[in-house]
Image: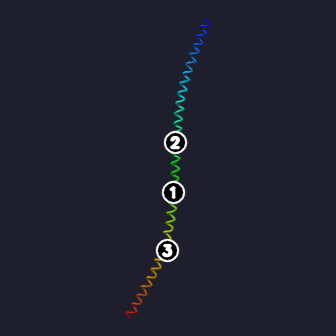
Amino acid sequence: QQQQQQQQQRDAEMEDLKQKMESLETEARRLREQLTEKEQQVEDQASALATSSQAEAALKEQHLALQKELAEVKAKLQKAIMVVGKLKTKQAALQTVCRQLKSKLQDQRGKSSS
């Protein structure tokens, strides 16, 4: 009788342990799936971050190229402004010479007609 009770108790404990083990295995499977999902999320985020970093690097490169181009355009503009200044000076000098020549020409006509 006592042995039978002890056997039943052991069987019950074994059944209880078996259920707990199955429950733990189910929980372990669920946690493994969660871990796999989280790993995938982290991988996706890392990939997105790398893409974002590459895009940022490309934008910085473009920005530097544009700054260089802008500096070149500014230098060309400064040269053009200097050239225009010189041309204006020459133009003023030529206008002065032209006025002097016209004046001389009119003086000569005036002298020759009298």
Residue type marked 3: Lys
The image quarter containing residue 104 is: bottom left
Ranked by sequence position, the earlier of labels 2 and 1 is 2
**In the image, is residue 74 above or below residue 40?**
below
CB within 8 Å, label 3 to label 1: no
Q: Mark 2 to mark 1: distance in Å?
A: 27 Å
Look at 59% across and 10% down and name the residue there. 7
Secondary structure beneath dot 1 equals helix
Q: Nearer the viewer, residue 45 or 109?
A: 45
Ranked by sequence position, the earlier of labels 2 and 3 is 2
**In the image, is residue 103 above or below residue 73?**
below
| Residue 39 placement (x, y as % from top left) | 54, 35
CB within 8 Å, label 2 to label 1: no
| Circle on res. 65 | 1
Look at 60% across and 5% down and name the residue there. 1
Look at 53% across and 33% down and name the residue there. 36
- Mark 1 crowd level (few <14, some 14–19, many ≥20, 10 Å Cα): few
48 relative to 10 in the view: left or right = left
**In the image, is residue 15 above or below residue 71?**
above
Q: Nearer the viewer, residue 105 or 73?
A: 73
Residue type marked 2: Ser
